[in-house]
Amino acid sequence: MTFNINDTFNKELPSDPDITNNRRQVFNACFSYVIPRNPTKPQLVHFSNEMAEEVGISIDSMKSKRLLDLLSGKSVLDNTHPYSMCYGGHQFGHWAGQLGDGRAINLFEVLYNDKRWALQLKGAGETPYSRTADGLAVLRSSIREHLCSEAMYHLGVPTTRSLSLIISGDEVLRDVMYDGNSDYEKGAIVCRVAPSFIRFGNFQILASRKDYTTLKTLTDYTIKHFYPEIKTDGKAKYIEFMKAVSEKTLEMIIHWQRVGFVHGVMNTDNLSILGLTIDYGPYGWLEGYDHKWTPNTTDSREHRYRYGNQPQIGLWNLLQLANALYPLIEDTQPLEDILQKYNKDFVIKYKSMMMQKIGLLLDKNIEKDSLLIKDLEVLLQDVETDMTIFFRNLSNIEKQKDYQKEELLSVISDAFYDQKVTDTIKIKWENWLFNYQNRLGQEVLRDNERKLNMDAVNPKYVLRNYMAQMAIDKADKGDFSLIEDLYQLLKHPYAEQPKNQNWFVKRPEWARHKVGCSMLSC
């Protein structure tokens, strides 16, 4: 197995001269060299054959001891120099100063089929940025990250990927709910893959320290390798860069809203400069459609990172990035214009996304269609309604069929968690569905064509929180079969998959308040 190593980040950017692994503040540098921790008894639990192919690894090689040692941190590839990135960030709206890769170690970059991939180990030991933490990860969170990274890719959501999931053979002490009840869990290591893991915070830390020389170097590097379409020079180059990042960030968040994904911890150090979903910590999927829901225990009071607030948090984070890039531009107006455009574009793109979800292609009456969507979003929260099942089943309504009102309601009623819907709510739903069917009558597509379009944007299968927890519970007992089953299921989230119909169901009641199925920590 030979990799086409093509390191750039640790070759073209300034490094921390201190090569010890002591916790410290790192200045005038973008990274520190780090050697991964030697795990006690690594064991390959699962790997993505698709991601292996993307980076040029054969299936047989993935199962070899050489790859096991490499992807667990037990060995380091010759002539490579692992490192952890230096960055800062705003956490829950407050500037936290230096953060950095506290439990992530970048191994190397690979060029394969004209694509650049950075391989990074999460949970491979302490770094200079670990602060008081141990730099390790547990099987519970690692399963969630491994499965969700790949599931998001197949949903069409911009995301980092996961190559492998490995048990380290070590026990790791964790307080799951941050309530003082710590316990030992199985340690694990995920090999994350992305073109780059650069975040908003990489730029913020340099600007906060007025290290404008390194800030310019990092920005030029990022544009050169990841935004090559930008051909301008001087201030115009950095304005175009900010504009491109803003557009990619909005695109990512619109996809989150489309599939019901809640990131849970949208701190600026968790926002990718490439518009990729990054850092799968306390994320979750909407079960009942609820704009106020967040999966993060540490956000249970403020609900800052709730589902309905994600687009505005994206804008807030972009404002922080604009502040960091300002020293390279020294003009607020173009930055303000970019942020204002984000707001305007969000209104347009969000409505377009919702129109697609309900199968409307022709904007016959802008005001009426907007009202139809607004009324729907209110109704979906009037009674607990499963987001995934509702939108998937909505495509079954036929525009010319002469439905009785009760008949029309039965098309989507499986999505209701409480089957005893009040008469008032029932009447509201019947009226909305009646208006919706009439609106479908103005569309030119046949029912089967519209259903194909709707089913292509409304997934049938997502990684519901309880599904991931079931895989975790089995894995804790040494049974990893459900990880593979879910991995295969989620490779085709828009397909009917009749044999997997048992996963197209509402969250079971036992999972409503179970730890890991409702709210969770990292």
Image (tube, rainbow, N blue to C red):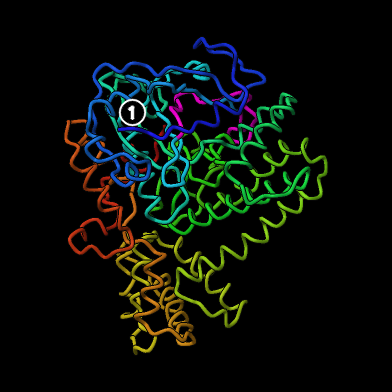
Residue at the image position 60 percent from the left and 47 percent from the top: 314
Q: Give the labeled residue for mark 1.
A: 71
Mark 1: which amino acid?
Leu
Which of the pair 271/12 is nearer the observer? Answer: 12
The vertical placement of 467 against 406, above or below, is above
The vertical placement of 32 against 449, above or below, is above
Residue at the image position 67 percent from the left and 37 percent from the top: 220
- Write down the quadrant of residue 513 in the picture: top left
Q: State which quarter of the image contains the N terminus.
A: top left
Instruction: Tell me where residue 23 appears, x and y as whole percent.
Output: 53, 13
**What secondary structure predominates along the stretch shown in magenta?**
strand
Element type at marker 1? helix
Q: How many marks?
A: 1
Which of the pair 462/276 is nearer the observer? Answer: 276
Decide whether residue 407 is among the magenta residues.
Answer: no
Which of the pair 477/404 is nearer the observer? Answer: 477
Magenta residues span 88-109
Instruction: Tell me where residue 166 appears, x and y as whole percent.
Output: 28, 30
Q: State which quarter of the image contains the C terminus.
A: top left
